[in-house]
Image (cartoon, rainbow, N blue to C red):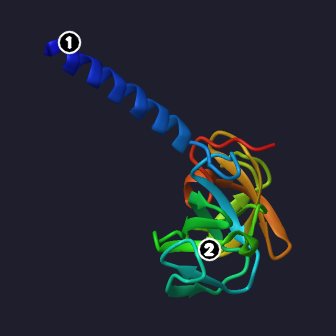
């Protein structure tokens, strides 16, 4: 009897490990989950489920807004915004162009990824900026013709351990 329970526990553990591994990649795109994208369209319906028959809960109305994809189903992606609001969006409304949301008012950006480097600009809270290169603690961002390096922890739309060239 104990052997049977032990065998069932081992099978359960293997299945759980398989599911966890499978969940780290999207079943449709084989891209990492979660991952960040941006809104390609100026507006996008956010639905309760992955089809046109599901109710629209709200509409995203900000082109280039960063979003986090948390699941995939066919042509649909489950996304969430900075505030955790989200639902299912058709993939055609999304872009792989990376953007971030500035999370500090008058965030100063620097010429180099160094707090002692000259300040090149200051961005207001809520600005959507294009994401460039990222090092361990800093990312290069640009918006409105200005660019510079900002501390990664003051941006939403980039993973804490993410590196970009």
- Residue at x-position 80% and y-position 54%: 111
Q: Quadrant of residue 67?
A: bottom right
Q: Is residue 102 visible?
A: yes
The reply to whether the C-beta atoms of the residues labelled 1 and 2 are less than 8 Å apart is: no
Q: Which residue is mark 2?
A: 89
For label 1, the SS is: helix
Cα distance between the residues tagged 1 and 2 = 47 Å
Please, which residue is most extreme toward the right here? 145
Q: Which is nearer the eye, 29 or 95?
A: 29
For label 2, the SS is: strand
Residue 90 pos. (x, y %)? 67, 73
Q: Quadrant of the C terminus?
A: top right
The tag on residue 12 is none
Q: Quadrant of residue 157?
A: bottom right
Q: Is residue 105 visible?
A: no
Please, which residue is most extreme toward the left here? 1
The tag on residue 3 is 1
Give whichever of discs 1 and 2 has the lower sequence position: 1
Q: Which is nearer the eye, 157 or 27?
A: 27
Residue 96 pos. (x, y %)? 77, 61
Give the left or right position of residue 80, taking residue 122 as reference: left
Residue 20 pos. (x, y %)? 47, 38
Q: Which is nearer the eye, 73 or 108?
A: 73
């Amino acid at each position: 009897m104990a052997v049977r329970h032990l065998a069932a526990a081992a099978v359960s553990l293997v299945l759980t490990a398989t599911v966890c591994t499978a969940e780290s990649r999207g079943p449709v795109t084989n891209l990492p989950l979660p991952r960040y994208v941006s809104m390609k369209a100026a507006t996008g319906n956010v639905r309760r489920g992955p089809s046109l028959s599901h109710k629209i809960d709200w509409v995203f109305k900000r082109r280039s807004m960063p979003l986090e994809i948390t699941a995939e189903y066919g042509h649909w992606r489950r996304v969430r915004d900075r505030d955790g609001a989200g639902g299912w969006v058709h993939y055609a409304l999304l872009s792989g162009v990376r953007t971030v949301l500035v999370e500090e008012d008058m965030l100063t950006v620097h010429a180099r990824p160094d707090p002692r480097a000259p300040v090149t600009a200051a961005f207001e809270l809520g600005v959507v900026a294009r994401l460039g290169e990222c090092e361990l603690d800093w990312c290069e961002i640009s918006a409105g013709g200005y660019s510079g390096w900002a501390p990664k922890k003051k941006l939403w739309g980039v993973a804490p351990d993410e590196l970009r060239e």
